Amino acid sequence: MEPKENLGFSKDQDAEVLHRIALGDLQVFESFYDRNAKFLLGIVLSIVRDEAAAEDVLQEAMLQIWDKARLYDPRYGSALAWAAALTRNKAIDSLRSSLRREKTKREATAEFEVRGPGATPLADREMQLAERALTVRKMLDELPPEQLAAIEMAFFRGLSQTEIAAATGEPLGTIKARIRRGMARLRDFLEGRV
């Protein structure tokens, strides 16, 4: 693949490039990508240490740059530094999510090894667990759909709040608020049952 023309922009003019990206200029965005992708990929690789994962994170970061270019303010630093900070944060979010998934997997494996594949819990314990599961399902069904979706993505699918925001297209603050309000409702419901 041959490199794209740089459309007459130098690295010093990236502030103008981000302004044009904010206006939806795809050709300028492609030029920005071609000039900076290798540098930004290096940042991601230094954090996630896996090339395939790093490429995925870079693509997510570039989408975020496309979506948030209008928020760039040259008074606070260069455009490349701004893009690098977004990319670094995306890489850290990805690493944290990966570590959470690994921890959950290790804990599940340890539980399986302790109890053994053929072990069956006592009937009373099994009934208690079934009752708890039913109670939790009822509590979850009482939540508004947007709170339920955010909580399920966070706690059952292991996504970070940033990943949920990206997946739903909602602002991060909205996702945080939905999870917080949903968890507060669940707590209130539980306290009322105890």
Image (tube, helix red, strand yellow):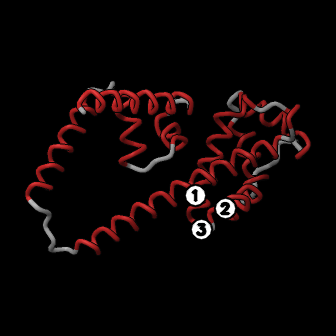
Look at label 3 and name its amino acid: Asp
Amino acid type for the residue under numbered disc 1: Leu
CA separation in Å, label 2 and label 1: 7 Å
Q: Nearer the viewer, residue 113 or 6?
A: 113
Location of the N terminus by quadrant is bottom right
Q: Which residue in the structure is indicated by mark 1? A: 95
Q: Which residue is mark 2?
A: 47
Could you tell me which residue is drawn at 30 percent across and 68 percent down? Answer: 111
Query: Which element type, helix, strand or loop, lies under badge 3?
Result: loop
- Asked which quadrant contains residue 12, the reply is top right
**Kind of element beneath mark 1:** helix
Instruction: Work out whether mark 2 precedes mark 1 in sequence or the reverse, and give the earlier one.
Output: 2
Quarter occupied by the C terminus:
top left
Q: Position of residue 35 (x, y in %)?
A: 79, 52
Q: Decide: marks 2, 1 in contact (CB < 8 A)?
A: yes
- Percent of width and height locating residue 72: 77, 32
Q: Mark 3 = which residue?
A: 50
